[in-house]
Image (cartoon, rainbow, N blue to C red):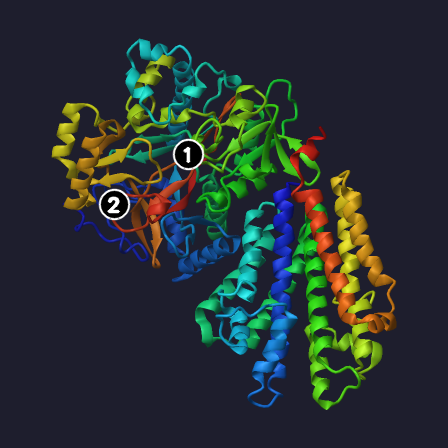
């Protein structure tokens, strides 16, 4: 990269801050600090040596004592880990955010229309905009949902959309999460930590608040109350304490003041759902379920599931209980359907998408497949129904053996895979061993869709803390940082 | 409140009480053992195990090693580390129900015992036991001052006091079975002090009866004292109070049964006289107490936690 070495180095602790081809959130291509990062930059320069490390340590200790942890699957010992949090906030200007906000609102609206359509007449399929077999072969399509009116036609009440920033500075959508998106509790606790670490800078910058998220979520769930139910009893259904996101389930239930239930707490009788309490059985009207479709009801879906409640699906179909998100929403975040989302937006809303997609190759298409399999080292290959960074090949960082294995898998089941060019995610400053260095980040805002659309400003910025890594998932060594959306540009 | 939540709060509290009790008993024993001649360890540790109602299974090592392993190993379910872990695991299941301060304290205690387990021989056992006791006391104080004294808190009290009543009954029973009660000679004197200390009762006893140790008085103090917090009667009274409060909160139709059983346990202890107890045999009296404790536990479960659905639907 020409020019990199000729530029004067930044002062300590930024002395190891080097730019490359990725978009840098803090420093522009001339090497000067972007105006909206200036206050944070100065704030860090003014810290005593080691002060940053000390504050970071205090924040980590408080995470440990609060038990802010997540679970890593497939590891025997010490499955519970502290959630790695980087203390330096990622900052977005007001205008950057407002474009993202409009784009997300547009996207969730279109996806809800799409879900209603495919579970009823299927106009979009008849018109050939989305291939019929693409929808029906999706493993998250639920035929049990056909011709069933969900409350207020809201399929996706809660979405978490992953955005990345291209080297050009443009935000694009990497994937939609419209089943059971997680991470919002880390957004809230990261804000808490950032306010403690940079109180002055936070105040001076003028940051949009996010603390109302639990309340907004509660209001969204309320709008789903079954007909004629004015004061719904709402419960959050968790798979239990061994789930990777259990901390979040407990956190949200506490913040909203709703009951945190497990499948074994629920009883379905005469198509009504009850929870077992010390005062006997109590009706439940709305369930914010944090378990996958397959496990909700062993009578309707997976018979071996002990996580849900037998009979829950019938109670749902009878309209006596609402679920958020609705069942069968996974069609809309299938990574193969993803490629059609721009077309879906144009079809229902007659608007151009505000946020673009990443170029995506369908492995079910033989020409595209041939091209990708011939150049695997350049692409990221993903299984369409997976999330959390599982079932994924990152071409440039893969070994020949891994590529061979993936080639075999793709050829065996092409519908199950898509490929995308490897994208250099933007980088933001992070505190690494007492110095400030850039690391790759993405952004997951959380969208609430009820009687109105609520998007708390910012979201969870996930960061690949390993140098050079492009994988931000917490299960794969990623962490989080706070996201500041400024009142002004 | 969810039945499962009540269940977890109850056991969280029981396990923590058990950890604290075990820590106290072993700590007292470690200091007593300094007074004994070498070679007699095995004998004393055997009593400790009996007083904690821990049975030696065939393939385990000798008593002294087992007793030592109770401090920081996880091989035995009754060990201090296992109890703290179980308490924390129960708390984790209901962490949205307890205050953040409570959770943070229990977490601190958990991390410190886990660290001790990992360090193994490197730690001073008495310092460690003291830290467990302090950690448990701190948790109780935080619980009392940060959590609403509602139904959940009452389940915590119920757990603590039923555990304490059971633990005290086993402890007192084992000492009285094994020590001569005719007079207190020099060799036994230390043993009786050990019993009182194991119940944090030595100073309180001295205030009531002076340092003149007599088995009958010791039994009266530990079994029947109305206001000393580590007496069986006090625990029974607190258990009954918790059960009544739970009944009032839950407004359950079946509450009267468990209240009756808890009331009977309390009454048994309130209206007994020590001379009659000793005449009839302390052992069989404590057996009755233990049986009634387990009846209260069962009734509590049948009423609030593991009740049959058909009953609740009121068909």
Quarter holding the C terminus of chain B?
top right
Q: Which mark is residue A31?
A: 2
Q: Can residue A299 be spotted in the picture? A: yes
The kind of secondary structure element at disc 2 is loop
Residue bearing the label numbered 1: A445
Q: Note whether B222 is above or below A420 in the view shown.
A: below
Residue situated in front as seen by the camera: A477 or A302: A302
Circle on res. A137: none
- Residue A24 placement (x, y as % from top left): 28, 42
Question: B301 or B164, which lies in front?
Answer: B301
Dividing the picture into quadrants, the one containing residue A460 is top left
Earlier sequence position, callout 2 versus callout 1: 2
- Residue at x 44%, y 48% (from the top left corner): A70
Q: Which residue is drawn at 53% across and 68% down?
A: B57
Q: In this view, does B104 lie above or below B21?
A: above
**A483 on left or right of B45:** left
């Amino acid at each position: 990269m020409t020019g990199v070495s000729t530029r004067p180095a930044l002062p300590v602790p930024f002395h190891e801050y080097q730019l490359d081809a990725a978009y840098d959130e803090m420093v522009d291509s001339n090497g000067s600090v972007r105006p909206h990062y200036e206050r944070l930059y100065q704030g860090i320069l003014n810290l005593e040596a080691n002060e940053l490390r000390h504050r970071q340590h205090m924040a980590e200790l408080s995470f440990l004592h609060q038990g802010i942890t997540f679970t890593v699957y497939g590891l025997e010992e010490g499955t519970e880990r502290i959630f790695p949090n980087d203390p330096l906030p990622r900052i977005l200007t007001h205008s950057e955010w407002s474009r993202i906000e409009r784009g997300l609102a547009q996207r969730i609206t279109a996806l809800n229309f799409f879900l209603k359509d495919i579970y009823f007449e299927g106009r979009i399929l008849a018109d050939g905009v989305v291939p019929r077999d693409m929808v029906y072969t999706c493993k998250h399509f639920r035929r049990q949902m056909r011709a069933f009116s969900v409350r207020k036609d809201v399929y996706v009440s809660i979405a978490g959309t992953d955005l990345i920033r291209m080297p050009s500075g443009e935000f694009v959508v990497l994937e939609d999460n419209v089943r059971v998106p997680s991470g919002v509790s880390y957004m809230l606790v990261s804000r808490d930590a950032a306010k403690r670490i940079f109180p002055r800078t936070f105040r001076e910058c003028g940051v949009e608040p996010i603390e109302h998220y639990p309340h907004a979520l509660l209001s969204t769930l309320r709008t789903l109350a079954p007909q004629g139910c004015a004061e719904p009893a709402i419960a959050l259904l968790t798979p239990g304490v061994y789930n990777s996101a259990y901390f979040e389930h407990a956190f949200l239930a506490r913040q909203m003041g709703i009951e945190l239930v497990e499948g074994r707490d629920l009883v379905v009788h005469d198509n009504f759902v009850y929870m077992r309490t010390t005062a006997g059985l109590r009706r439940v009207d709305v369930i914010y379920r944090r378990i996958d479709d397959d496990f909700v009801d062993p009578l309707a879906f997976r018979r071996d599931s002990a996580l849900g409640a037998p009979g829950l699906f019938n109670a749902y179909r009878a309209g006596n209980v609402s679920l958020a998100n609705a069942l069968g929403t996974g069609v809309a975040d299938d990574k193969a359907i993803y490629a059609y989302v721009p077309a879906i937006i144009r079809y229902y809303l007659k608007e151009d998408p505000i946020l673009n997609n990443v170029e995506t190759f369908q492995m079910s298409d033989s020409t595209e497949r041939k091209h990708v399999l011939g150049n695997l080292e350049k692409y990221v290959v993903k299984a369409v129904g997976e999330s959390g960074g599982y079932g994924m090949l990152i071409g440039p960082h893969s070994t020949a053996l891994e590529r061979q294995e993936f080639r075999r898998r793709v050829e065996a089941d092409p519908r199950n895979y898509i490929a995308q060019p490897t994208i250099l995610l933007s980088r933001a400053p992070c505190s690494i061993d007492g110095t400030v260095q850039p690391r790759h980040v993405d952004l997951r805002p959380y969208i609430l869709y009820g009687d109105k659309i609520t998007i708390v400003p910012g979201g969870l910025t996930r960061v690949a803390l390993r140098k050079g890594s492009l994988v931000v998932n917490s299960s794969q060594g990623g962490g989080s940082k706070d996201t500041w959306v400024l009142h002004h540009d | 409140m969810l039945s499962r939540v009540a269940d977890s709060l109850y056991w969280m509290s029981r396990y923590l009480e058990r950890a604290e009790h075990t820590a106290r008993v072993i700590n007292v024993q470690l200091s007593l053992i300094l007074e004994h001649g070498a070679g007699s360890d095995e004998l004393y540790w055997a009593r400790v195990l009996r007083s904690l109602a821990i049975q030696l299974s065939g393939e385990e090592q000798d008593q002294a090693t087992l007793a030592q392993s109770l401090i920081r190993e996880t091989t035995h379910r009754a060990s201090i580390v296992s109890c703290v872990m179980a308490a924390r695991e129960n708390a984790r299941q209901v962490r949205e129900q307890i205050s953040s301060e409570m959770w943070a304290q229990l977490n601190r205690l958990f991390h410190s015992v886990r660290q001790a387990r990992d360090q193994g021989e490197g730690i001073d056992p008495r310092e460690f036991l003291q830290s467990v006791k302090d950690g448990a006391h701190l948790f109780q104080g935080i619980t009392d001052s940060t959590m609403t004294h509602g139904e959940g808190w009452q389940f915590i009290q119920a757990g603590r006091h039923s555990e304490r009543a059971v633990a005290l009954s086993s402890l007192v029973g084992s000492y009285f079975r094994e020590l001569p009660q005719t007079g207190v000679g020099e060799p036994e004197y230390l043993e009786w002090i050990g019993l009182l200390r194991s119940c944090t009762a030595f100073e309180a006893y001295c205030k009531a009866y002076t340092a003149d140790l007599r088995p009958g008085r010791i039994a009266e103090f530990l079994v029947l004292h109305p206001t000393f917090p580590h007496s069986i009667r006090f625990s029974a009274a607190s258990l009954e109070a918790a059960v009544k409060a739970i009944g009032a909160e839950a407004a359950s139709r079946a509450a009267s049964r468990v209240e009756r059983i808890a009331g009977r346990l309390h009454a048994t202890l309130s209206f007994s006289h020590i001379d009659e107890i000793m005449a009839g045999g302390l052992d069989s009296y404590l057996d009755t107490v233990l049986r009634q404790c387990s009846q209260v536990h069962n009734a509590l479960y049948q009423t609030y936690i593991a009740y049959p659905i058909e009953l609740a639907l009121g068909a």
